[in-house]
Amino acid sequence: MISWPQVSSVRARARGAGDKGMLVAQGKDEVASLAHLLEVDDDAEALLCMCWGDLEFVVHGAATEVLVLHLDGSLASGQHGQLPLVRREELVQWLVSRRLVSPAGSPLDSAFWGLAPNVDFVLPGSDPAQVAGKFARAFWTVRTVAPASYEIIGEWAHLLVDDRGLSGVAVPGKLPRLREVLDELGLACEA
């Protein structure tokens, strides 16, 4: 069991990456907030999952412990097995706000971690399904998030298109290229 008051920091990293990852909580208040989101149902029966998990939290306290997050709603630790999260939806929103996972709930490439949203375009008169289709035909990964809302993922951009327009994050040096792509796809945009 982790003694959260003794934890000095928490880092997130891609599952199995073995690197330092990204600092996501440091100091008593941030650590306590994250600990609240990572609370598991101790009374539940331990789960048995055959996957490796989605993200790791490296918890630095009196000892270093690695927690493995399964985005389907559970958390695994070496000591207690895999238990269901109490606040899965809140945790996913927290992860989305830090660009660790996509709005669809899938892990993002670490190149996007921590980047502030820097894409916000209005696409006048564009149907989100048609915009998503154009990106898909140009070999971008497209997933349906909700009716008329699509996640668009490329090597250097992670976007969402819906009835409000195109938003998300692009690697900063690639923003001019994103405008070129929109032009190539015949999508008029307004910043």
Image (cartoon, rainbow, N blue to C red):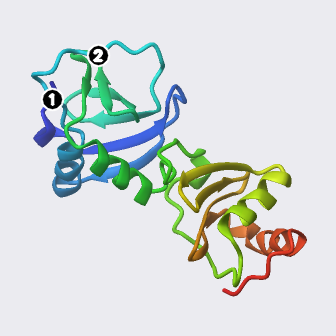
Question: In the rendered image of this protein, does residue 85 appear above or below residue 141?
Answer: above
Choose between 128 and 65: the one closer to the eye: 128
Q: Which quarter of the rendering shows the N terminus?
A: top left
Q: Amino acid at mark 2?
A: Leu
Residue 124, position as x, y percentages in the image = 69, 84
Question: In the rendered image of this protein, does residue 71 appear above or below residue 180?
Answer: above
Q: Amino acid at mark 1?
A: Asp
Helix, strand or loop under label 2: loop
In the picture, the disc for residue 71 is none
Q: Farthest residue toward the bottom? A: 190
Choose between 158 and 134: the one closer to the eye: 134
Residue 90, position as x, y percentages in the image = 28, 51
Q: Farthest residue toward the right? A: 184
- Which residue in the protein does label 1 denote? 41
Question: Dot 2, how many residues are within 10 Å of its Cα: few (below 14), some (14-19), or many (20+)?
Answer: few
Image side of residue 30 versus residue 57, left or right: left
Q: Please give the name of the residue rendered at 38% of the width and 42% of the height, measured from the top-left corner.
A: 11
- Which residue in the protein does label 2 denote? 47
For residue 81, which quarter of the picture?
top left
> Mark 1 and mark 2: span between their CA atoms?
11 Å
For residue 115, which quarter of the picture?
bottom right
Question: In the rendered image of this protein, does residue 173 appear above or below residue 49?
Answer: below
- Name which of mark 1 and mark 2 comes first in the sequence: 1
